[in-house]
Amino acid sequence: MAEIRRIYRLVTDEELARIAGTVHHGGIVAAARPRPLLPFDSDMAERWAEAGAPLVALDGVGNPHNLGAIARTLAFFGLPRLLLSGHHAQAGLSDAAYRVAEGGLEYVDIFEAPHLPQALREIKDAYRVVGTALRGGRSLGALPQDPRPICLVLGNEEDGLPEATLRACEALVTIRGSRAVQSLNVSATAAILISQIASRARFAEKQSREPNRAPRSGRTPKR
């Protein structure tokens, strides 16, 4: 900070915790302008889909720690966008979300669709909209093949996806466990499914790049 001639203060640990409002400050506190949410547009989404990029949407995920953890997972797997609904319980870009994301939010653009069910219906030609459900859904791997990338929609930690959002989904997926506990935390569910959709996207990209090759011998193989 001294080298770039910016104002800074060195304070005690107690004073830093008071300024930060938490002891989980990592040794530094900076004043910054809040990052705005970007408006969602279906035309943009069509261009993302053309590039084969999966999309993740959250509808009512209220815990900012879960939001931050999901953003960190997206950054880890190289998915650059997250869509938030206008649900009254939906967490936003708070300091807690940034802290849990551990830098992941710097690599993910955050968009907002105030009326998420409508937005999902608008992108169905470009994206395969897949919702998550506690029970009754299929495994992600069991979904039929489809050329469209997946838009994965995750719901509120307690109530799941709202009914209107469920109706906008083409398919529902469920992670099946041992039933020792009812369900996974939404951020854990997101991590498992994001890993799978990222893998599917990489495989589809690889397939699209491979040229059609003739047999090595140059002869038509016998039946």
Image (cartoon, rainbow, N blue to C red):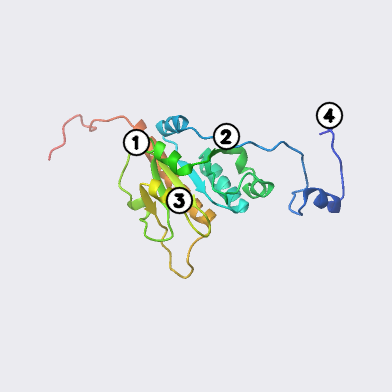
**Residue 79 located left or right of residue 201:** right
From the viewer's perspective, tell me whether residue 137 is left or right of residue 220: right
Q: Secondary structure at mark 4?
A: loop
Q: Amino acid at mark 4?
A: Arg
Eye-nearest disc, 4 or 1: 4
Left or right of 213? Residue 19 is: right
The type of residue carrying mark 3 is Leu
Q: Position of residue 199 (x, y in %)?
A: 42, 44
Determine contact: label 3, label 1, CB under 8 Å.
no
Looking at the image, tell me whether mark 2 or mark 1 is earlier in sequence order: 2
**Residues at circles 4 and 2 in contact by the CB criterion of under 8 Å:** no
Closer to the eye: label 4 or 2: 2
Between the residue at mark 4 and the residue at mark 3, the CA separation in whole angstroms equals: 45 Å
Residue 123 seen in render: no
Q: The residue under label 1 is which amino acid type? A: Gln
Element under disc 2 = strand
Task: Name the residue beneath numbered marker 4.
Answer: 5
Disc 3 versus disc 2: distance between alpha carbons? Answer: 24 Å
Q: Earlier in the sequence, mark 4 or mark 2?
A: 4
Q: Quadrant of the C terminus?
A: top left
Across and down, in percent, residue 171 comes to: 36, 49
Q: Residues within 10 Å of mark 4 (few under 14, many from 20)?
A: few
- Circles 3 and 2: CB distance less than 8 Å? no
Neighbours of disc 2 within 10 Å: few (<14), some (14-19), many (20+)? few
- Residue drawn at x 40%, y 31% as measured from the top left: 50
Q: Nearer the viewer, mark 3 or mark 2?
A: 2
Residue linked to disc 1: 207
Q: Nearer the viewer, residue 141 or 40?
A: 40
Q: Which residue is mark 2?
A: 38
User: What residue is drawn where x is 73% and y is 53%?
Assistant: 24
Can I make out residue 6 in this image? yes
Q: Position of residue 120 (x, y in %)?
A: 43, 41
